[in-house]
Amino acid sequence: MLQEPPAVAALHVDMRLPTAAASTDIPSQPPVLLLHGWASTSAYWEPLATELLDGGRTVWIVDLPGYHGGDVLPPDFQWTLESAADSVAAVAARNASPVHIAGHSMGGSVALTLAAANPELVASVALIGMVPAPPNEVFRSMLESQLRQGFIDDATRAKCMKAWFGALSPEDHRLLSRGFELPFEVLGPSGLAAMAGVAADVPEKVTAPTLVIAGVGDRLRSPEQAQAFVAASPLRRLVAIPDAGHSVHWEQPHACALALGAFWNESRQPPA
């Protein structure tokens, strides 16, 4: 008996073209898909997106399943890294050629899962604040206990925000904490998927060039974890950015954009 294909969610995508003043010396570049992390909204991509657009890149900011206001997921949709990756793959397939995918934290796990399953869709992978390694145990146990109880309390939200972003202005804190306002039917399962991480065989299946961008002060992924992951394959590169933690794209968007641009230029395949 044929199995039904897994449910795929229709995703909201904010597609942006380079600014008019952007340099035109990078012709025919594929779009960059930005995938956010757990309990986050696409708003935190704005500083990096601006840098990329000003640099002549086309940017697609993707909201993962259920993360966009008003999203209605298919009745049989189950939130896993695989189902999220299948949903993003449908977005990537809209482009005529492979795309660059950059994922932060959980979004990096989705990016790797997609690249392993659909190599023909992916020109490169960038992992921001993420490598497939066990998360900080204190953070993991705290978060899993919250997910089991069916809600995220204020104290845990505050700890997450501090670990992810450090000190924030009240306005930025309000903006960046909106991801915790998601329905728990999305927040809970996606959080468990984030904690489980990618399947053990996924990284070895990724054939696209892969960049790891790590904040030197990241409290959730250690420099040793990033270095070990990169050392395991000649396809992987590491850029460590000072004065940044887990959300390096928010804290140091210019340095992050420079690292991405250099990586894309280096890994760009010559025309056939």
Image (spheres, rainbow, N blue to C red):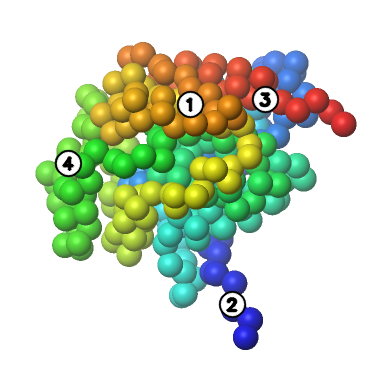
Where is residue 15? Give x, y as percent. 61, 41
Q: Is residue 142 visible?
A: yes
> Which structural element holds mark 3?
helix
Residue 4: mark: 2
Q: Which of label 3 and label 1 is nearer to you?
A: 1
Q: Name the outermost residue toward the top.
A: 242
Determine which residue is flagged by label 3. 267
Query: What residue is shown at x 67% (from left), y 36% (from top)?
Result: 123
Where is residue 112? Give x, y as percent. 52, 44
Within 10 Å of the Cα at label 1, are there few (<14), some (14-19), or many (20+) other Cα atoms?
few
- C-alpha distance separating marks 2 and 1: 39 Å
Instruction: Please identify the quarter of the rendering in which residue 54 is found.
Output: top right
Of the residues under marks 4 and 2, which one precedes in the sequence?
A: 2
Where is residue 33? Give x, y as percent. 58, 39
Of the residues under marks 3 and 1, which one precedes in the sequence?
A: 1
Query: What residue is shown at x 32% (from left), y 50% (from top)?
Result: 195
Residue 231: mark: 1
Quadrant occupied by the N terminus:
bottom right
> Which structural element holds mark 2?
loop
Of the residues under marks 2 and 1, which one precedes in the sequence?
A: 2
Check disc 4 and give the amino acid type: Val
